[in-house]
Image: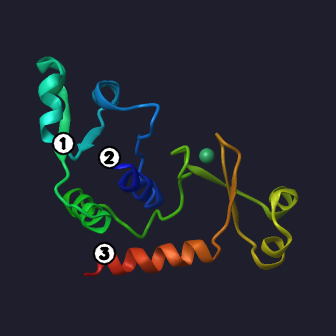
Amino acid sequence: MLQSLATWLRALGYDCLAGPELFGRRLLEQAVAEERVFLTRNAHLVNDWPRALVEQAQIVCVGGGTLPEQLHEIVERYSLDWQRFLFTRCLACNEPLRVVNKLEALPHLPPRVAAREDSFWQCGRCGRYFWHGSHVQNSVTRLRRWMER
Ligand SMILES: [Zn+2]
């Protein structure tokens, strides 16, 4: 239910588990085991789960109805720095990105990117390469609009 929020929290550089392979009670069990905050839109969801598990969990019911509202709510609640760690984590894998030099990235880049960009990052899990192209600038513009209202 909060997949977009999870993706944006990763974009901000924060460690955030989500995904179709992990949901409901299993996700809550993992949150407890790893001392993570469990974000949900449905406060009643936990009524069906074992009380002992729920009592150990740190469950936050996200109130905002839209993605900008949800993101704003979590950033405020946990005093997250929404600028400092931007795009330091793979959006797909949640893995922190490592800096790679241009020579290493070159064989994997579209020619127009290779000609224009000099800084590159790679995900250690999925192997994808990243750079700060127009998609990043567009995301930053959108994020700034959401956070500064
Ligand atoms: Zn990845």
User: Foreground: 29 or 86?
Assistant: 29
Q: Name the residue beneath numbered marker 3.
A: 147
Label whose residue precedes the other's in the sequence (1 or 2): 2
Q: CA distance from mark 1 to mark 3?
A: 24 Å
- Please say whether residue 55 is visible from this viewpoint: no
Residue 126, quarter of the rendered image: top right
Residue 7, quarter of the rendered image: bottom left
Q: Is residue 81 above or below residue 48?
A: below
Helix or strand or loop: what does disc 1 sit on? loop
Helix or strand or loop: what does disc 3 sit on? helix
Q: CA distance from mark 1 to mark 2?
A: 9 Å
At label 2, the amino acid type is Met
| Residue occupying the point 19% across, 37% down | 58
Tell me whether the residue at label 1 lies in contact with that at label 3, contact meaning CB atoms closer than 8 angstroms. Answer: no
Mark 1 closeness class: few <14, some 14–19, many ≥20 residues within 10 Å: few
Q: Position of residue 111 (x, y in %)?
A: 86, 71
- Please say whether residue 42 is visible from this viewpoint: yes
User: Foreground: 127 or 98?
Assistant: 127
Classify the position of the C terminus by image quarter: bottom left
Q: Is residue 141 above or below residue 94?
A: below
User: Foreground: 66 or 97?
Assistant: 66
| Residue occupying the point 56% across, 72% down | 136
Please give left or right for residue 14 compared with residue 59 in the image.
Answer: right
Residue 42 marker:
1
Q: Name the residue beneath numbered marker 2.
A: 1
Q: Is residue 29 above or below residue 119?
A: above
Label whose residue precedes the other's in the sequence (3 or 2): 2
At label 1, the amino acid type is Asn
